[in-house]
Image (cartoon, rainbow, N blue to C red):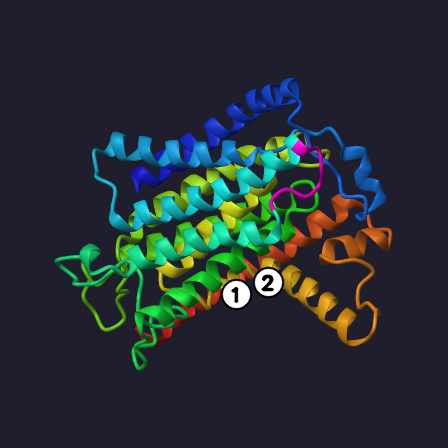
Amino acid sequence: MLAILFGGGLALLISLLGTRVAINGLTRRGYTQEIRDDGPTSHHTKRGTPTMGGVVIILAAVVGYIASKLITRDAPSASAVLLLFLFVGCGLVGFLDDFIKIVKQRSLGLRSKAKMIGLTVVAVVFGFLALSPALEDDRENSTPASHHISFIRDFDRVTLPTVVVILLIWVIVTGTSNAVNLTDGLDGLATGASVMVFGAYTLVGIWQNNQSCENFPTAKCYEVRDPLDLAIIAAAITGACFGFLWWNASPAAIFMGDSGSLSLGGALAGLAILTRTELLLAIIGGIFLVITMSVILQVGYFKVSGGKRIFRMAPLQHHFELKGWAEITIVIRFWIITGLSVAAGLGVFYAEWVAGS
C-alpha cells in the first residue's frame, strides 16, 4: 500500500511540475498542434498550442513506479514490466505520429496503416510474452495473461488456443488505444476521464491483492498474477494524468497528443487483460466505448445510406459542439458520465464478490 501512495504521489508531482517545463520547451522549439480544417471552426483558436504532452505523462508514471519500488526495496513483477512495455510501446507509436505532424506541419501524422502496424507489433509482442510459459509463476503456475475470456474473473469452461488469445489481445489493445485517441478531442476530456478510469483500476488491483488466492485461498479468491504491482502502475498513471490535467484543462496550455492517448489506451487494455477484467472494461471505460461507437455508427450509416449522417459530426463530443454546447459544458458532462460508468463498473465488480462469498 505504501508503494501505491509513493508511486501515485511522485507521478503527480513530476507531472505537475514537469508539464510546465515541457510547455516552455515545446513552445520554444515550435512543437505545436496543427488543427484539422474539417473539425469545428472554434478549434482554430487552439492552433499553436504545444502538443506531445503525453511524453510527460509516460515519464512521470514510469519514474513514479520505479521510485516506489526503490523506496520499498521490492523487485518489479513480470506483470508490471509487461504493462510498462505496452504503455511505453503504444506511446512510442503515438510519439512518432505527433513528431511527423510537427515536422511536416500537417494535422495528420502517421498514415493509418503505419499506425496500425506499430500498434499491432506492440500488442502481439505483449500478448506473446504475457502467455509465455517462461513467465509462469512457480507458486501459482500461471502466466500473466490468461487463455480464457474474462469478465470479473476467468470463464474456465472454454480454454482458447494461444493464437486466438493473441488475436483477442490485439483487438483489445488496438481498440482501446484508438478509443482513447478518439476521446482526446476537447480540452481535458480524455485526461479527466483517464484519472477516474485508472483510479478505478487502482482499487480493483488493491481488492484483488487483498483477496488473492495466494494470500487467501478461498472459493472466491482471485487468480491474478501480481495485482498489487498492477495497482501501483495504475496509481502512478492516475497521478500523472491528474498532474497533467492542471495544464490540460480548458483553456488547455498543452495537449497530450497521440503519444498520450495511445499510451493511456494501451495501458488501460493491459490492465484489463492482466487483471482478468476484459469485459468489465466496457463498463468502467464506458465513455470511451460510447465515443468509439459514435464513429462506427456514423461511418457505417454514411456508407449504407448514400451520404446521410446520424450525428452532425463524429466523434460524439463534436456533435454537441456543433449543436451549440460550450466546450467546458461537454467536458464536464462527459466526466459525469465517466464517473457514473466507473461507479457502475466497481459496483458490479464488488457485487459479484459479495454474491459469491
Task: State which quadrant residue 94 falls in.
Answer: top right
**Going by the picture, which residue comes out furthest to the bottom?**
157
SS class, disc 1: helix
Up-down relation of residue 13 to residue 240 (above or below):
above
Q: Position of residue 139 (x, y in %)?
A: 13, 59
Question: Rounded to the nearest whole Å, what is the CA distance between mark 2 and mark 1?
Answer: 7 Å
Q: Which residue is mark 2?
A: 289
- Left or right of 237? Residue 306 is right
Quick check: 137 left or right of 59?
A: left
Q: Which residue is mark 1?
A: 282
User: Which quarter of the rendering shows the C terminus?
Assistant: bottom left
What amino acid is labelled 2 in the image? Leu
Q: Amino acid at mark 1?
A: Ala
Q: Is residue 211 visible?
A: yes
**Would residue 353 be visible to someone looking at this image?**
no
Q: Residue at x 37, y 65 (%)?
A: 166
Which residue is found at the position 76% from the left and 71% from the top?
303
Q: Who's the residue at 34% across and 52% down the image?
A: 206
Mark 2 / mark 1, whichever is N-terminal? 1
Callout 1: 10 Å neighbours few (<14), some, many (20+)?
Answer: some
Provide the residue span drawn in magenta. Answer: 104-110
Whether tag 2 and tag 1 are in contact, CB under 8 A, the answer is: yes
Coordinates of residue 53 in the picture (x, y in percent): 57, 33
Mark 2 crowdedness (10 Å alpha carbons): few <14, some 14-19, many ≥20: some
